[in-house]
Amino acid sequence: MKVNKHYAQLEESYLFSNIAHKVADYQAAHPDADIIRLGIGDVTLPLAKSVVEALHTASEEQGHKETFHGYIPSEQGYPFLREAIRDYYARRSVRLDTAEIFVSDGAKSDLGNLLDLFDVDNTVLVPDPVYPVYVDDNVMAGRPIRYLPATADNGFLPMPGADTAGDIVYLCSPNNPTGATYTREQLKVWVDWANAHDAVILFDAAYECFVTEPGLARSIYEVEGAETCAIEVCSFSKIAGFTGTRCGYTIVPEALLREGMSLNKMWLRRQTTKFNGVAYIVQRAAAAVFSPEGMEQIQQNLDYYRRNAAVIGAALEEAGVWYCGGKNSPYLWLKCPDGMTSWQFFDWLLDTAHVVGTPGEGFGACGEGYFRLTAFGDAERTKEAAARIVAALKTLH
Ligand code: MLT
């Protein structure tokens, strides 16, 4: 028997598991420390009222013979949810067919599972820094990876150059962790590059709901030509607080062909074989997100997180720390003070302010010297964390 030796190439544990262990160790050693967690981007507001009502109604249906739902008739998702997603895009002038929409248990699963469609010899282009799942998924498969440096010089938005070569490229916009967001013009350059190079873009739009500035893209399909080169992955976690409820969706256009094969048909074949769909009650809850009441309630939650981002941003400004993000994104990306490495700053901030963040280096080598804070916390705790961060940083001067 042989195991998949590529696992030996991975870091010992996944970034957020590693941080959770470190924080647990610190708490055990300092039981009185009142730790505020602004590390992993987990939401703190409960599900919206209309979503909870949909969950109740659907649960009740499952308790009666006449309304009970067994195996999901289509692993791709119930038509009522796929139609609601189609209409959500249509309101932004993006036309999708429901046959192109696949409901899943979340973006993270799909980002890994999509790789089933591609040969292991394909070269993968991954921005650095970025959501660590893209790298780990490909390391597990043994696929060659090339990094696209995302630095302050390019606004943390790498663009293809004359020598850029690869088969699969991940783009995450608004970006996790930097918050940088591509304009439509910038995405058009990537789309033209992918179509010219026979490459496929895996576009992670999990944070699209945070975009407020005009000119910034919320979907890659806002760009002409994307339907022949891009797959878009999205999530209900950030828009509607589904981190514990689990639901996401992936769009694979019918026009996306490679080597004469339809990636839409391949993905359908993969999903119908390896996936039995998302629970009926969860799909009902997800559809409620897109109802007029759901959208209004969700906007209130997003505004709550936006206010948190403004509070953290103001604290960093007061402390004289450089940062970006927090505008079209729930993440703030700051430069570690006093030349500290990102893990040194993690330890220092935990010990000095009892605030947890995420070291930039955990998102890639180019993240060294940077640090990420999330705006998804409780508002009062975020204000408390911001005050502690300012006080701690002032001790450095
Ligand atoms: C993050 O903190 O980067 C995200 O919450 C992780 C995720 O969505 O899986």
Image (tube, rainbow, N blue to C red):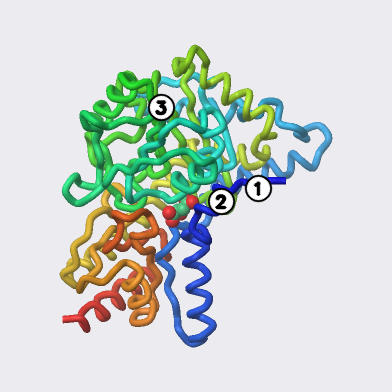
Q: Nearer the viewer, residue 353 or 387?
A: 353
- Residue 289 position (above or below residue 49): above
Q: Residue at x 55, y 47 (%)?
A: 6
Task: Say what secondary structure mark 2 lies in.
Answer: helix
Tags 2 and 1 in contact by the CB under 8 Å rule? yes
The alpha-carbon separation of the residues under discs 2 and 3 comes to 25 Å
Task: Say what secondary structure mark 3 lies in.
Answer: strand
Picture coordinates of residue 5, whole percent (x, y): 58, 48
The alpha-carbon separation of the residues under discs 2 and 1 comes to 9 Å
Q: Residue at x 29, y 47 (%)?
A: 328
Say which quadrant the C terminus sits in: bottom left
Q: Nearer the viewer, mark 2 or mark 3?
A: 2
Picture coordinates of residue 178, whole percent (x, y): 30, 52
- Can residue 297 be seen here? The reply is no
- Can residue 11 be seen here? The reply is yes
Task: Please name the amino acid that badge 2 sits on.
Answer: Tyr
Task: Please name the amino acid that badge 3 sits on.
Answer: Val
Q: Quadrant of residue 65?
A: top right
Residue highlighted by disc 2: 7
Residue highlighted by disc 3: 200
Q: Residues within 10 Å of mark 1 (few under 14, many from 20)?
A: few
Residue highlighted by disc 1: 3
Q: Nearer the viewer, residue 4 or 260?
A: 4
- Residue 322 position (above or below residue 51): below
